[in-house]
Structures are given as structure tokens and as C-alpha cells.
Image (cartoon, rainbow, N blue to C red):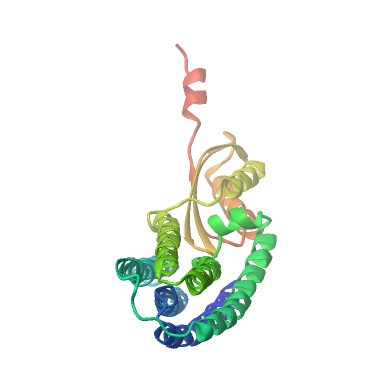
Amino acid sequence: MAEDESTSTVLVAGTANLLIAVAKLVAGLASGSSAMLSEAAHSVGDTMNQVFLMAALRKSRKAPDPKHPFGYGMERYFWSLLAAVGIFVLGAGFSAYQGIESLLSPSGSEGSPLWAFVVLGLSFLFEGASFGKGVLQLRRNAAEAGAPVVSFLRGEADPALRAVVWEDGAALVGLVLAAAGLGLDTVRGGRTFDGIASLAIAALLIAVAYGLGRQNQQYLIGKAASPRMQSDIASAIHDAEGVDRVLELMTMRLSPEQVLVAARVDLADHLTPEQIEQAADEIDDLVKERFPEVRHLFLDPTPDRDEADAEAPG
């Protein structure tokens, strides 16, 4: 199940981030590298974000109740939004502070960079393993949905999985930036490039936080299913017996596995009230069988007003 796989992916990422954060902090204090301390803050922020994502996965499983008849699936988008805020505040904020402080005090005391390079290398391996697991799940989920990987990541992917992939991808880029800054300062002396690397990491985290926050915000305010899915659902309803035309189709994604559909349809004029009820039941069964994500389908049998006006005597 995709939800269980997302839980496993988040746990792996959280464990890796916690261990890496401790190692980066020790190496940053030993080497005096602001970029390394920025990366430590980045990993601490990512670890806290995994806690948010686990809360999202757990809370979204609650069954519907009278207060929330459509369930709690949108909990995932809310907690994933908080994770994006965490990236911005903890990661980007501290990285920017460290970068500015390093540039304003370029001749500050420095320690040995050896352990920093060792930790950066090990961190790259661990982050790479976590990133690889996330990408594998992403590819499987995209294949099941019949969508390209990039568009699936930007649109229909589980918000917890999306956050892990973006966070780990940003972490790998951040490690490269930190290594470059530390390496240049080791060769040339001073802390200028180390500070620049910290500011670059801050800019990277701001971009990731904005992207994740924007995606989750759109779902929280009622984003529709993908255009492809909407077209397929409309075609399925149109092909059902007794349907002359689909006049309007509206969708809203309640969670990565749940979609709400409301359709206004023009049924054949000869249908009796009993046949209309039967047609509605058949359409409901047909759509939910073809599209398991559709948990709620509301049909509004409505005559085509344009057609009725055209047939009316002048």
C-alpha cells in the first residue's frame, strides 16, 4: 500500500537526518565552518519535519465522522505545510545567519576541516540512500498512475513522499555547496567562501520551502484532480447507458488516495424516475470501479438548458 510505503520512506529519512544532524554539529563545532553548522541546522530541521510528516500520515487515517464526513485526508497537506515552514524558519533562517556572520567576521578562529570533510562524505552517502528510496517509491507510484515522474511529483504525489524527495534532494545539493565552500577556504584561507556557501544553502532552502508550501496550499484550498483524470471520468460517465451529455464536472482531491466528484449530466428524455435512479447507481458503480480514488460521486441529472431553449417554440 502506498501509504505504508510512505511511512517507511519517512522513517528512513528521519533516522538518517537525526544521525547526520549530530555528526554535522560536532564536525561544525570542531572545524569552525559556518556552512557545516548551516547543514547541521538543515538536518535538524529535516528531522523535525519528518515528525510532522509522521503526524500527517497518522492523523489522515482517522475514519470519517459527523464533524468531518469526508474524512481527515487533508491532514497530510496541513502537516506537510508546517514541514515547509520548518524548512524555511529552521534551515534557511539559521543558514542565512551563519553566512552573514561568517562574511562579517572572515578572520574568525578556525579548527581542522578534516572531520568536516569526513562527515560531509558520510552524510552524502546516507542522504543519497534516503533520496534513492524516495525516488524508487516515486517512480513506482508514478507508473501506477500512468503519469511522468516529474509531473506526478509536482501534482499527485503523496505530500509526505514529495517532502522527503525535495528535502533529501536539497540536502545533497547543500552538502556539495558546503564541501565547495569549505574546500576553497582551506586552500585560500579565511571564511569568505564558507559564508557564501551558507547563504547559497539558505537560498536553496527558501526555494524548496516555497515550492512545498505552495503545492500544499493549493490542495488545502480545494485543488481539482489532474486534467487527465477529469477527462477520463467525464468520458466514463458519458459512455454510461442513458447519458446524453456531461454538462459539468467538478473534482476535488481530499487526499492522495481520495477524490470527490460532482457531475451535472443530461440524461435521456425517455427515462422514467425509476430508470433515472438505476442509471445513477450504475454510473456510480462504473466510475468507482474504474477509478478507485473516487470515494464520493454526486450526480445532478439536469436537462441541457441550451438544448431546451432551442427546442422551445419562439
Which image quadrant is residue 36 in?
bottom left
- Compared across the picture, whether 6 is left or right of 61 comes to right
Viewer-proximal residue, 261 or 107? 107
| Residue sitting at x 55%, y 45% | 276
Relative image position of residue 127 (x, y in whole percent): 57, 77
| Residue sitting at x 43%, y 88% | 26
Q: Quadrant of the C terminus?
A: top left
Viewer-proximal residue, 90 or 282? 90
Relative image position of residue 158 (x, y in whole percent): 53, 66
Which image quadrant is residue 69 in?
bottom left
Which image quadrant is residue 109 in?
bottom left
Relative image position of residue 70 (x, y in whole percent): 42, 64
- Of all residues, the one furthest to the front in this rendering is 188
Relative image position of residue 126 (x, y in whole percent): 59, 81
In the rendered image of this protein, does residue 189 appear above or below residue 231? below
Residue 259 visible in the displayed image: yes
- Compared across the picture, whether 214 is left or right of 301 comes to left
In the rendered image of this protein, does residue 232 appear above or below residue 141? above
Viewer-proximal residue, 37 or 136? 37
Q: Quadrant of the N terminus?
A: bottom right
Viewer-proximal residue, 304 or 105? 105
| Residue sitting at x 67%, y 70% | 136
Residue 155 visible in the displayed image: no
- Of all residues, the one furthest to the top in this rendering is 314
- Compared across the picture, whether 150 is left or right of 312 comes to right
